[in-house]
Structures are given as structure tokens and as C-alpha cells.
Image (cartoon, rainbow, N blue to C red):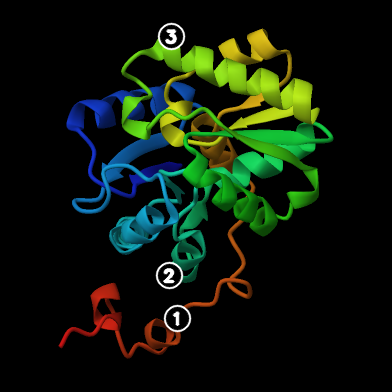
Amino acid sequence: MRILYAVPGPMDRKELDRRVAMLRSWAAPGTEVDIVCASEGPASIESMYEEYLSIPAAMKLIYAAQADGYHAAILGCAGDPGLDAAREITDTLLVVGPGQTSFQVAAMLGHRFSVLTIEDSMIASSYELAYKAGVQAKLASVVSVNIPVLELATNRAASMEKIAAAGHLAVERDRADVLVLGCMSMGFLDVAKEIEAAVGVPVVNPSLTGLKVAEALVGSSLMHSKAAFATPPKLKSGKVTDLDDLYIRL
């Protein structure tokens, strides 16, 4: 099984190597995991505008992954930017959104879950993502830790303390019985088990959960529905053969 983790923006090579090493350590025997990042796009995603900026380049990574024979691709952002579009342009490549996946897994693990997100700017979009994932009724709250994405790893201990404090707030104030880390960079801090021990409820890591669900779906021979995510007509008819041909420049 071959899975590609696609980062929807530029990323330092050292960090890419660190993340793929973690993904490979989590992968089941027989699963090959690779990582690639877009050559252009936002440095980090902390707003809907930055999500939309990241989509065109990320879709090219996904489209190329299908041509390269990968079995699944994971969008490397917990906001799932362009997930619907990625599923439209693929018919042999499973595309997993770690945000949607983590929300749905959290909904299976308890009665109410809360999302721990990075900034206040991402609270509204987290509620929207829960609606799209079909689990809005189980969402207790979205709590911001107020740490910019690019600063999460600067002081791991300080970040973990703020994440744990947000988790305590969600559990005690909002009565959440499951927590979701609402950022892939937060997931790659690998703090879920430490937060779980501190707070006392399950903590879903989107970086790990996205991979394991991708493995499970590919292993079950399941693919996203093309009735739900129809191929763009121009691609389906053969009028265009490349994503760039869908975009007109004057």
C-alpha cells in the first residue's frame, strides 16, 4: 500500500523529513508512506483565505499522486482545504481529509467532543467542518490555544501546557468527553497521549488518525463515491487532460 502525505504549502526539508519519519513509524507493515509539499502557497494556514490560497497547488500534488500509482493521499492540513475538489479529480486514489476523519472518529469515541484549534481565526471554520463531516450535533466546543502554527514547535513544553489548559477548559466547562487536536502541526508535536493523561479523556491526533483511517479504507477496498464527488465534466469528456487546462489566463 502506497500513501502520500501532501502538504498544501512550502515546508522546510528538515521538517518534511521529521514528519515522514513519524508517519513511517506509525504505518502498518507493508505500508509505504511518502511526503511532498507544494512549491508555492501560504507558509501556514490560519484563516479561510489561506486555506483557499493553498488549494490549487495542493490539487496538483493530489492529481500527480494518482498518476504515480499511489493508493491514497492525505491532505496535510486539519482544515481539509480542497477535500471535495481533490475527490472530484481522482477516481483511483482515495483522498482522506484528516479534519473530517478526526471529527468522525471523535464522534465514535464519546457523546460530545471539543476541538483544540490554533487561533481564534479558525474557530468558525471548525464549526463549519463539523457540519460538513455530519457530526455537528456532537461538537461541544472549539477552544483556541492562541499559538501561531509556526511557533508551536518553538517551545514544545509551553505549547503542551497551553493545549492541556484548553483541554481542561473544554472538559470542565463544555463537558467534552473526547478532544481533537485541530491542527496537523499540533499533531506532529506528538503530544496527544500526554494531553490525554493530563486531561483524562481520549485525544485524537489528526496526523496519526488520518494515516490509520487511510490504511483501513484502502485495506477494505473502499473509495470515496464518485456519485458524491463527480469528475469535472471537462476532464471526464477528455476535452482537457491536465488541471492547468481548466484555468484560463488572458
Q: Left or right: where does residue 87 sit relative to residue 141?
A: left
- Give the mark, 1 or 2, whose residue is nearer the N terminus: 2
Task: Tell me if residue 211 comes above or below residue 152 in the rendering.
Answer: below
The residue carrying mark 3 is 157
What residue appears at the point 32 percent right and 42 percent down from the top-left corner?
Answer: 44
What residue appears at the point 30 percent right and 81 percent down from the top-left corner?
Answer: 246
Residue mark closest to the camera, 3 vs 2: 3
Where residue 172 sits, quadrant-wise, is top right
Q: Amino acid at mark 3?
A: Ala
> From where the camera sits, is residue 43 visible?
yes
Residue 92 x/y as whole percent: 47, 63
The residue carrying mark 1 is 232
Question: Foreground: 76 or 72?
Answer: 76
Task: Tell me if residue 239 comes above or below residue 15 in the rendering.
Answer: below
Residue 30 x/y as whole percent: 46, 32
Task: Work out which residue is located at the far left of the displayed protein and give it.
Answer: 250
Q: Which mark is residue 89?
A: 2
Question: Foreground: 59 or 78?
Answer: 78
Task: Work out which residue is located at the far right of the displayed protein and give it.
Answer: 111
Residue mark closest to the camera, 3 vs 1: 3
